[in-house]
Image (cartoon, grey):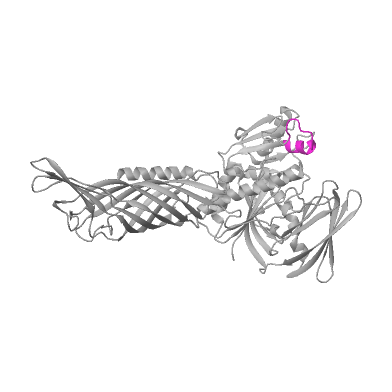
């Protein structure tokens, strides 16, 4: 029992690391296993067959024999699953020596074996690689030969008799229980997943009597290793990807025009949003004063300040959403001051950076914020430490860079607020979103490199002949709200005409069809979470992994739809920004999906969209550094099933 407990704890420990990385999990697995059977005999065996009967009865015995099988597993979720083994089951061994009445030592060996069929219920209680299983077995007797040895006295010679046991049951039925751990061997993003799975199982004697006479019974402990292979489909179960736009080769002077629309235009959505505080305060060139766009209070107003004023209202105008959120951000010093009053042991480090103008300017920025917190909120100066730097710890401007330096310097002229997470907790904002992001329709106009599109425009005509005009555009892809095109109608068909003006002044006209249908519900409910990224960084930081696992995943219910949309600011190359937005969104999706699966939530659908730096879909404008920093984001919308 002690060794079994130690083995169990070891397997749980291995499982904790074996499945710690985010990976797709196939539903179906196939493979092979090999093991050793430790067979323990008990009962009475004396009549071997009609021709051979031992002078003394055999009772206990032991043997080591092989087990090998083909296996299949079905795992529809992270906890429950089914297992099946079909294989060779060696149950042979040697009985303990006995003395016949003539005082003659006697031995008996057998190579008893079966073809076994073993279905099991698999349970992964911690939603990781560790699992337990229980099930039954139906076994067909394959071999039942024996070798009987007896010493003859006083001649001191041996007689050996071989044969087949009589009265062997053709089929025996039993049960088993076991545990194991799946250790991934393949890369976590590989479409073919391979697991190495050590396991141990117990097969009691109940129902396992090999013969219909006497009382021979056997119990087996099995230990072995399985190799399992599974394949993740290109579109993983429960994941909804946007349609792939396949653009054929384009001839010189021609334009490939494609339209990708959502299956339905979503209804208005009442959103409970968790809005993060960007812990930067940006300064203007040539001034150490806190910019006027930040809300600075007097002592009287500061005493009455309460951050709940941002949480309880509702924003019904989508144009006001970014304005409302920026109002929250522009009160960051008041939120920080009030939270420092509430948490008297909390301390703050203010790191001022001057965008290359020297450490003195940086520390002057930091001291200006410290002065405000001390003078207005009465925070002890000893609780606030200031530092000055030439560039931030995570700078936007890179050595040797020459493009968009002014915008990059605006982002590096700032004070970083470094403190405990409690002082920078996100705020709650309630809003009515009349135009959810998944209503966007993608229009692509792609030309040959030899003759590029200078600009292009759209004319969208409805069933009544009314035309809506959009453009001109200068990017290859543009998004237009399906709700805007549809208006108040429940559905409509549209003729879409795209006119592209080429570099040489010529025009290319292409047409397409579009049908839009509005979702039936008047208003849906949803949750929204925002993940912020540093400049030019495609991957999530560890702190947000924990946030996704502990603060977002618990609110995902069965059959929910999760829309994950990534964005980038306007700094940099268009294609690189598209890559950043898609990488960020897919990274968030991988972490969140893994966390949801571990909680055993079923039927969740995921939609991932990368908008790049497209300003029509951007959460904020791009005129100020804080707006650009908030645009480096992934937004998660959770829509619960009705």
- One can see residue 570 in this view: no
264 versus 131 height, above or below: below
Q: Return the residue found at the far right.
A: 505
Quadrant location, the C terminus: bottom right
Residue 48 higher or lower than 374, as above or below: below
Nearest the viewer among 419 and 112 is: 112
Q: Is residue 404 magenta?
A: yes
Residue at image location 74% in from the left, 55% down from the top: 320
Q: Position of residue 305 (x, y in %)?
A: 66, 49
Q: Is residue 150 left or right of residue 301?
A: left
Q: Is residue 510 left or right of residue 63?
A: right
Place of residue 325 in the rendered image (x, y in percent of width and height, measured from the top left): 70, 51
Observer-nearest of 191 and 88: 88
Q: Tell me where residue 119 sits by quadrant.
A: bottom left
Look at 27% across and 55% down and name the residue there: 205
- Please state the extent of the stretch shown in magenta in the rendering: 397-412
- The x, y position of residue 352, in whole percent, is 69, 33
Q: How many numbered marks appear?
A: 0
Front residue (pair 380, 598): 598
Q: Position of residue 454 (x, y in %)?
A: 86, 49
In the image, what residue occupies the spot 34% across and 52% down? 89
Q: Inspect this view and state whether residue 163 appears.
A: yes
Q: Nearer the viewer, residue 188 or 568?
A: 188
The residue under the point 38% across, 49% down is 68
Q: Residue furthest bottom?
A: 464
Verify whether residue 33 appears in magenta: no
């Amino acid at each position: 029992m002690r060794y079994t407990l130690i083995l169990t704890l070891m397997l749980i420990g291995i499982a904790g690391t074996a499945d710690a990385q985010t990976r797709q999990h196939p539903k179906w697995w196939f493979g092979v296993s090999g093991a050793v059977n430790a067979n323990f005999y008990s009962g009475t065996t004396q009549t071997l067959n009609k021709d051979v009967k031992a002078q003394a009865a055999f009772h206990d015995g032991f043997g080591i024999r092989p087990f090998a099988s083909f296996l299949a597993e079905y795992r529809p979720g992270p906890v429950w699953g089914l297992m099946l083994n079909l294989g060779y089951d060696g149950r042979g061994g040697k009985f303990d020596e006995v003395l016949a009445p003539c005082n003659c030592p006697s031995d008996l060996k057998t190579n008893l074996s079966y073809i076994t069929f073993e279905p099991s219920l698999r349970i992964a209680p911690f939603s990781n690689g560790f699992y337990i299983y229980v099930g039954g077995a139906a076994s067909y007797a394959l071999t039942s030969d024996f070798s009987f040895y007896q010493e003859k006295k006083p001649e001191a010679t041996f007689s050996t008799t071989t044969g087949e046991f009589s009265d062997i049951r053709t089929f025996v039925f039993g049960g088993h229980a076991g545990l194991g751990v799946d250790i991934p061997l393949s890369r976590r993003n590989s479409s073919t997943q391979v697991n190495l799975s050590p396991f141990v199982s117990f097969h009691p004697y109940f129902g396992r009597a090999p013969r219909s006479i006497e009382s021979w019974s056997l119990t087996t402990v099995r230990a072995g290793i399985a190799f399992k292979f599974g394949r993740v489909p290109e579109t993983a179960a429960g994941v909804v990807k946007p349609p792939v736009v396949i653009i054929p080769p384009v001839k010189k002077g021609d334009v490939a025009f494609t339209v990708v629309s959502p299956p339905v235009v979503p209804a208005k959505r009442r959103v409970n949003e968790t809005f993060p505080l960007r812990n930067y305060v940006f300064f203007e060139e040539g001034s150490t004063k806190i910019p006027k766009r930040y809300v600075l209070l007097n002592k009287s107003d500061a005493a009455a300040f309460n951050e709940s004023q941002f949480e309880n209202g509702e924003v019904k105008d989508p144009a006001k959403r970014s304005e409302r959120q920026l109002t929250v951000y522009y009160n960051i010093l008041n939120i920080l001051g009030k939270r420092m009053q509430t948490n008297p042991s909390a301390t703050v480090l203010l790191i001022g950076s001057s965008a290359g103008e020297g450490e003195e300017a940086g520390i002057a920025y930091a001291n200006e914020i410290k002065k405000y917190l001390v003078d207005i909120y009465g925070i002890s100066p000893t609780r606030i430490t200031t530092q000055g730097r030439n560039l931030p710890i995570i700078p936007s401007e890179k050595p040797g860079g020459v493009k968009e330096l002014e915008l990059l310097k605006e982002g590096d002229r700032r004070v970083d607020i470094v403190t405990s997470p409690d002082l920078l907790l996100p705020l709650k904002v309630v809003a009515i979103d009349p135009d959810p992001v998944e209503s966007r329709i993608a229009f692509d106009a792609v030309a040959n490199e030899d003759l590029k599109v200078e600009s292009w425009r759209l004319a969208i005509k409805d069933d009544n002949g009314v035309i809506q005009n959009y453009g001109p555009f200068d990017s290859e892809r543009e998004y237009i709200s399906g709700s805007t095109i549809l208006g108040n109608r429940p559905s409509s068909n549209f003729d879409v005409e795209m006119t592209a003006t080429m570099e040489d002044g010529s025009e290319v006209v292409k047409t397409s069809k579009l049908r839009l249908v509005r979702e039936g519900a008047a208003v849906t409910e949803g949750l929204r979470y925002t993940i912020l990224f540093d400049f030019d960084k495609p991957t999530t930081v560890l702190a947000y992994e924990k946030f996704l696992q502990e603060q977002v995943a618990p609110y995902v219910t069965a059959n929910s739809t999760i829309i994950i949309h990534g964005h980038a600011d306007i700094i940099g190359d268009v294609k690189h920004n598209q890559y950043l937005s898609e990488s960020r969104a897919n990274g968030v999706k991988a972490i969140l999906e893994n966390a949801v699966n571990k909680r055993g939530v079923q039927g969740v659908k995921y939609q991932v969209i990368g908008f790049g730096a497209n300003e029509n879909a951007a959460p904020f404008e791009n005129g100020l550094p804080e707006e650009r920093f908030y645009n480096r984001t992934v937004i998660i919308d959770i829509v619960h099933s009705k």
